[in-house]
Image (cartoon, helix red, strand yellow):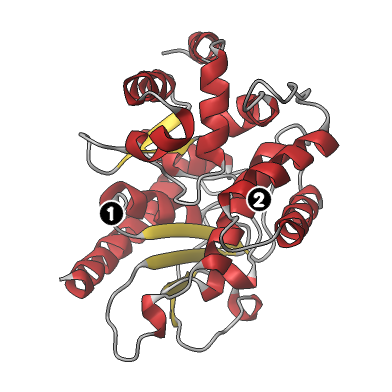
Amino acid sequence: MTDLRLLAAQAAAMAHPDRLRLLALVLTDPSSQPTAAHLAGSFGNRVAIVRHLEAMADVWLLARVGDPRTPGYRPTADAIVRFGGAAIGAAPDHDRPVVDAGNHKQLMDRVVDELTDRFSETFGRETVERFVRESYGLLADRASVQRYLPALTARFATDRLTALAAPFNSADAPGSKAISDVLFVCVHNSGRSQIAAAALRSLVGSRVRVRTAGSTPAGMLDPGVRAELARRGLDRLAEIPRPLTEEVVRASSLVVTMGCGDACPVLPGRRYVDWPVEDPAGRSPDEVRRIADEIIDRVHVLLAEIDAGLD
């Protein structure tokens, strides 16, 4: 499908208002890749949910992850950049008005409302609001394009609150081999860590939570890395770069660094591994492919360790 045909197909798919509301739920789901069954409690009819999710996945606005029979769904960069603001602004019920996608203040208020409901058993509204506002500020400091900030903030704040809420992580259990959360970190979060995370997500489904971050994140993925991920069919499993925060490190069983050095917080009870991999930024396609091959080989070794720990 050509770029223009894809853009038209995405616009047609998202003309259905229920799909905007459903995308908002996916963006703010603590699991990061909810199934249709998981969303049914918030949205309603499961058959309709599956139809809507599949329609969005068919035009590359959602990525299917895990068991093909009951997949989880991750929002792609296209979904966040093109429709994220409109999704957050869509009325979640008949009692609230639609918010204009360009009104960031009102959209942030909507995100606070949504996440306060999601995390009501763990955090008060003041904590949620602090994380949402702080997340927006961290992203805005580096964003060259402002229009997707509300959707990316919703995603980023959700992930941070989920990490903070984790009551117990296998990394805290003495002698435990289990790896339940993996964090890949590189300086700009636009190359090496994105390749590693996309590859591992494609292999583990929902068995392991996979996150990425950067000590000084870029605005978008490196173009050469994006092209290589697309060639491998992994581009929809990558993310828009995001900053490294302490609560995400704290929630991770294993932290894999790729050049962040001393910028990565060292916390007790976490395993840290450094992969001395070259930075693919600005390299030729052949060099990017070689670097991606090395990273994916390392991911397969890591997967064998994960599987051994989960036995």
| Residue indicated by mark 1 | 204
| Residue indicated by mark 2 | 116
Q: Which residue is at the front of the view, 65 or 19?
A: 19
Asked whether disc 1 touches disc 2, contact meaning CB atoms under 8 Å apart, the reply is no
Element type at marker 2? helix
Q: Is residue 218 above or below residue 48?
A: below
Q: Residue at x 65, y 66 (%)?
A: 215
Residue 16 at x, y = what percent?
Answer: 53, 11
Q: Within 10 Å of the Cα at label 1, are there few (<14), some (14-19), or many (20+) other Cα atoms?
A: some
Q: Which residue is at the front of the view, 283 or 258?
A: 258
Residue 145 at x, y = what percent?
Answer: 76, 36
In the displayed structure, does residue 168 sit left or right of residue 222?
left
Quarter of the view holding residue 223: top right
Q: Which residue is at the front of the view, 282 or 154?
A: 154
Q: Is residue 59 above or below residue 108?
A: above
Residue 50 seen by the camera: yes
Residue 162 at x, y = what percent?
Answer: 54, 60
Q: Which residue is at the front of the view, 250 or 274?
A: 250
Looking at the rendering, in which quadrant would you find the C terminus? Answer: bottom left
In the displayed structure, does residue 104 sit left or right of residue 195?
right
Quarter of the view holding residue 39: top left
Q: Residue at x 72, y 59 (%)?
A: 131
**Which kind of residue does numbered mark 2 sit on?**
Thr
**Which kind of residue does numbered mark 1 sit on?**
Val
**Which tag is nearer the camera, tag 1 or tag 2?**
2
Q: Residue at x 42, y 55 (%)?
A: 197
Element type at marker 1? helix
Q: Earlier in the sequence, mark 1 or mark 2?
A: 2
The single residue placed furthest to the front in the displayed view is: 95
